[in-house]
Image (spheres, rainbow, N blue to C red):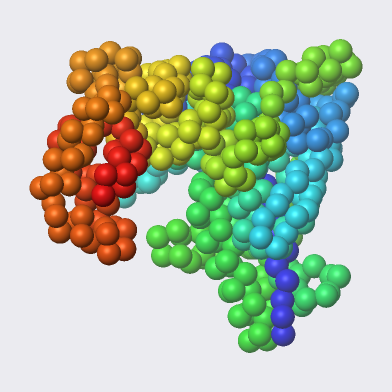
Amino acid sequence: MEYEIVIGLEIHSELQTKSKIFCGCSTKFGADENTQTCPVCLGLPGTLPVLNKKVVEYAVKAGTAMDCEIARFSKMDRKNYFYPDLPKAYQISQFDFPICGKGKIHIKGEGFDKFVGITRIHIEEDAGKLIHEGSEGTLADNNRCGVPLIEIVTEPDMRSAEEARVFAEKVKATLEYTEVSDCKMQEGSLRFDVNLSVRPMGSKEYGTRTEMKNLNSFRSLENAIKSESKRQIKEIEKGNKIIQETRKWDDDKGLSFSLRSKEEAHDYRYFPDPDLVPVILEEEYIESIKGSIPILPWERIEKYTSEWNLTQTESQILTTTKQMADFFEESVMYCDDAKSVSNWILGDLSALLNEAGIEITQIKFNPEGLAKMVNMINKKEISNSAGKTVLKEMFETGAAPEDIVKEKGLVQMNDEDAIKEIVLKVITDNPKSVEDLKSGKDKAIGFLVGQVMKATKGKANPGVVNDMIKKNI
């Protein structure tokens, strides 16, 4: 029997605010345990929360970018449950009146071109973190308590691991471009919960779903979906029933295991938080946020392919992060050759970034520096090979390209008389290669060009050299 996978996602994203959702404590990642807490985020008796205005702004911005309905009235609710990493034993979240209603995101890939519905986006506070110390037991770090989140809940519209990954990547790009979240998955800023079921192909009824929580990479997301769907199909074909449960994904072992049963929905006993007034948004406020939405990645891709003749693949890679797209576009402002700028960023510069393990925002030179280097190559002031030397030196020192060219003597040799003299000597010194070339062995010209470039220390114009060799043989 053929089966269909049905997938819905719940995506938690920490917002890029400097302070927590209801107090002034810092949200900075990596501080010593329990050093960024106060009576408010620990929920001590007698304290009163105050909603961070920036949290509302970021939630509306995210919802607008994802084509959501923005609620003019929403409220904060208490979700009651006890976990050791939530000291006040309830979480302030939103229940029946979330800040963002229905929306959608378009996804496209091999074999699919569709919209994935968003059910809602609501704001809430994060819980703390448990640290398991073996014989010392389990310790609680409460620094994360009260860090602001949005939770993006989708409709069960995805039908494969690839669709889910593409959707998650698009959500990440949207949050980064709007500067709502830094989306640093290694720091827990973006986490995915997967709700998954399988059903016979053509069936209208949903199967029993399981939930896998806190996946923090696209690789984990895709692998977990593939593994869990296979597990469910195997169980069904054995005649077993799928149990509604929460499962934990082990990325190292490539397996999930049961955490707890969810046969009955939890009764969280939601009720409106008595210490927080409703959030009422005016039309003027919503319109001002709509006006602040930047050009989103898919809009940039359209521009790159239609105006600058880049390929779809090149455009998608350049827009993977807002920082790379910004660097590319600023470089093109100083260099009217988008294709060459793209090639250098996606090729040599990306290799240097990967080798150093840094982001494009951390490099020592600015986009104008890259543009100047490309312009020097296009004007034949330096060779493409010299450009690689210049870029590496710029990357390591931050020096200006013109200074590097001058200091290292990389100015390209364009004097045809001088080049001709060297070409004739190379032809004389390499009769076998000359004969090979005459007999149709075209590869021989590469050797001869190489000899001329060696004699000129890489300064000769390779195109001139190539033409001159053919002309003189």
Quadrant showing the N terminus: bottom right
Which residue is pictured at 57% across the width and 66% down the height? 226
Residue 238 in percent (x, y) is at 63, 86
Q: Nearer the viewer, residue 363 or 42?
A: 363
The vertical placement of 22 against 445, above or below, is above
Asked whether, in this view, residue 253 is left or right of residue 214, the answer is: left
Residue 278 visible, this orientation: yes
The vertical placement of 245 against 275, above or below, is below
Q: Nearer the viewer, residue 294 or 53?
A: 294
Q: Nearer the viewer, residue 43 or 24?
A: 24
Residue 90 in percent (x, y) is at 65, 35
Residue 280 in percent (x, y) is at 85, 19
Which residue is pictured at 84% across the width and 29% down the height? 70
Which residue is pictured at 88% across the width and 23% down the height? 72
Instruction: Kindly give the residue lying farthest to the left in the view shown.
Output: 429
Q: Nearer the viewer, residue 173 or 460?
A: 460
Residue 155 in percent (x, y) is at 78, 51
The vertical placement of 2 against 410, above or below, is below
Asked whether, in this view, residue 278 is left or right of residue 189, the answer is: right
Which residue is pictured at 20% across the width and 20% down the height? 409
The total of numbered circles placed on residues is: 0
